[in-house]
Image (cartoon, rainbow, N blue to C red):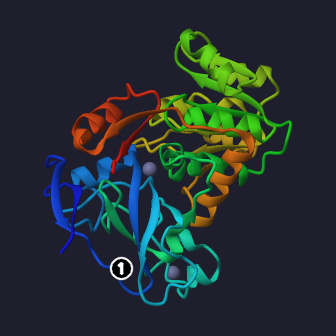
Amino acid sequence: MAQMRVVQVDRPNGPLEVVRREIPEPGAGEVRIKVEACGICHSDTLTRTGAFPGLAFPRVPGHEVVGSIDAVGPGVSRWKRGDRAGVGWHGGQCGYCDTCRRGDFFACETATRVTGITSDGGYGEYMLARAEAVARVPEELSAVEAAPLMCAGLTTFNALRNSGARPGDLVAVLGLGGLGHLGVQFANRMGFRTVAIARGKDKAPLAKELGAWRYVDSQAEDPAAALRALGGARVVLATVTNGPAMTATLGGLGVHGDLLVLGAPESLEASPFLLISGERNIKGWYSGTSIDSQDTLAFSVLTGVRSMNEVYPLERVAEAYDRMMSGAARFRVVLTMGG
Ligand SMILES: [Zn+2]
Ligand SMILES: [Zn+2]
């Protein structure tokens, strides 16, 4: 049997080991992807630590996967060998549970497959994916360019486009990291008056370069007051994992303003008075399904949104992973498979 190299974790907090395995055959409704690039996401810690409910070891992490279809299983007709394809966090849906029949595939009750968590992901040369979980990848994007758009890009793009904000509205992006640097670009391209909020004066030029209309240094000024001075935000897109930093923006929401929570701190405090007095909302946003990923890629081609990436070969996965988790990467880390 032909073999492949993959990176697996075999126990909670175990090392990321490059191992050889047999190349798997796609089952009914599945495709096999020859992986070219896979982004490293903060959520990959859920695989590494085993913290995600139901996770079984050994497991191959990775849910920012881009490559090409290499084989199709029984019952798959719309994909063929050679098609460029990407897979994100959402690993598939049953299509028949109550939630699916209401169109909320992301919250499917029965086929909750999560790429790199309940099934093996993209840290390797090949992976299997459910056909409905695959997005088409346009020729204009390289695999490395497309990979971070499958989670970080999708999450920010999809949250913003479903936020209810309209062109010209004041939209703030809290954080200028892996998600935030994409969020600012998307918000700018969608026609929002885009405010980037981060810590330190030194990030102002980057914010401008990404398309922010204003930059707020939250160490130098109160972000809520700064947003109020601009008329109050329709949306604050919270990409950080720091609860107090999110709380500090709540007072900057305008009437009916929404704090859209993408980052996951342990807890979040909110003043009920602020919520009630302006009918403000705090709302979480799930990344999206494969068609949302496909729309993210197409919009990025159309408007020139690109992730800034540091690229590592698969063999250097341990170093690449530590780099991403340290928070020092500018701004996403992508593994390439070579050959
Ligand atoms: Zn992710
Ligand atoms: Zn379902």
Query: In the picture, residue 47 is in which quadrant?
Result: bottom left
Residue 29 picture location, percent across and down:
45, 84
In this view, 113 is above or below 299 = below
Query: In the picture, residue 119 is in which quadrant?
Result: bottom left
Q: In this view, does 80 lie to the left or right of 254?
A: left
- Dot 1: within a 10 Å radius of its alpha carbon, few (fewer than 14), some, or many (20 or more) residues? some
Three-letter code for the amino acid on which mark 1 is drawn: Pro
Would residue 304 be visible to someone looking at this image?
yes
Q: Residue at x 79, y 45 (%)?
A: 165
How many callouts does the rendering have?
1
Q: Is residue 270 left or right of residue 241?
A: right
Q: In this view, does 50 lie to the left or right of 68?
A: left
Q: Quadrant of the N terminus?
A: bottom left
In this view, 161 is above or below 28 = above
Write down the residue under mark 1. Answer: 26
Of residues 1 and 85, the one drawn nearer to the viewer in this rendering: 1
In this view, 65 is above or below 184 = below
Residue 169 picture location, percent across and down:
82, 37
Would residue 114 be visible to someone looking at this image?
no
- SS class of the residue under badge 1? loop
Asked if the beta carbon under badge 1 is closer than 8 A to the nearest atom of ligand 2, the reply is no
Residue 286 picture location, percent across and down:
54, 57
Of residues 64 and 34, the one drawn nearer to the viewer in this rendering: 34
Q: Which residue is drawn at 35% across and 35% down?
A: 324
Of residues 32 and 151, the one drawn nearer to the viewer in this rendering: 32
Q: Which residue is drawn at 35% across and 44% down?
A: 335
Residue 240 picture location, percent across and down:
49, 35
In this view, the residue farthest toward the front is 339
